[in-house]
Amino acid sequence: MLSIALSLALAPLAHAAEPTPVVVSEPAEVSSPLPAVAQGDEEEEDEDSVKSEQEAVKSGKVESARKTQEPKRRKKVIKTIQPKTFMKLHRYEIGPSLGFVANDPFLNRYIMGAVFDYHVTEIFAIESTVAYSPVLGVGGCEDPDWKPLSCQLLEKNSVSPDISRLTAHGAIGLQFAPIYGKVAAGNNIIAFDIFGTIGIGVTATEDDIVALQAEDEPPDGPAHRTASQVHPTTVMGGGARIAFSESVALRAEVKSMTYIETVKSTTLEMKNNLIVQTNVSFFFPGMK
């Protein structure tokens, strides 16, 4: 009876001390397979995407896709050399000129003329010129054409200087303008070029009978026979042209004219006249 009573008393305690194994570990074991399955799917998708990208690279589709996806960049043009503001191509140039003979020690010679050019290209032009120098006196110290040296040689030294007046000139030649530039003048840009000329022409001269001391000579004398002459002439020179607009320019130039003159029907002399002149040029038609 005592043993039965003890077993009945200890039975509730035994049931209370027994653990509950289902609640603690079972949920972790049940939920653990799910993430493993999802990770496997992601790895398969990554492998598929890598393979597809490799195939696209081999076929060239990726490069074209990148080009289409890249934004279009605007092209910016930077002008380092500005275009020419003054053009001469296929244009005519005409204008009056004024000048003087700079190297004549005996006479003052002032020249009026005109220049006519056709510009075949921007560099080359065909040029023609005409000029006239008026005779202002008949010789002697009172002649406005005479310089003090002529009067001194004739009156004080009794020396007959060989004085011949340039009276007219005409030439045709080639102009070469290889240098072009611009100058800033305030808010304006002035274009200019530097040119050279070479050509041939004729020069008319008139001897000073008073300076040759041939006033008493008959009209058919040697001094009178060669008093008026026309000489074949070579022309070389150069200058600069400054363009103030599309149609107007200013030129300044120096020309060397060389010819052979006969003095008193017997003596040959080579003469050289260095002419300094300026002219206003007008261009037409307008620039294209």
Image (cartoon, rainbow, N blue to C red):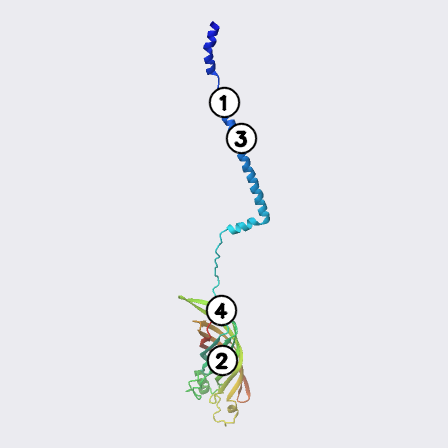
Q: Residue at x 48, y 9 (%)?
A: 7
- Observer-side mark, 2 or 1, equals 1
N-terminal label among 2 and 1? 1
Compared to residue 159, the image places residue 185 above or below, namely: above
Q: Which residue is mark 2?
A: 129
- Separation (CA) of disc 4 from disc 2: 23 Å
Precedes in sequence: disc 4 or disc 2: 2
Q: Nearer the viewer, mark 3 or mark 4?
A: 3
Q: CA distance from mark 1 to mark 3?
A: 18 Å
| Residue nearer the viewer, 170 or 155 | 170
Q: Which residue is mark 4?
A: 180
> Disc 3 designates what residue?
33
User: What separation in Å lies between label 4 and label 1 (alpha carbons)?
Assistant: 104 Å
| Mark 3 residue type | Pro
Q: Secondary structure at mark 2?
A: strand
SS at mark 1 in the image:
helix
For the residue pair 65 and 97, the one nearer the viewer reads as 65
User: Mark 1 — residue?
Assistant: 22
Q: Residue at x 55, y 50 (%)?
A: 63
Q: Is residue 51 above or below residue 90?
A: above
Badge 4 crowding class, 10 Å Cα cut-off, few under 14, some 14 to 19, many 20 or more, is some
What separation in Å lies between label 2 and label 1 (alpha carbons)? 125 Å
Q: Amino acid at mark 1?
A: Val
Residue at the image point whose x is 53% and y is 50% from the top: 66
Q: CA distance from mark 3 to mark 4?
A: 88 Å
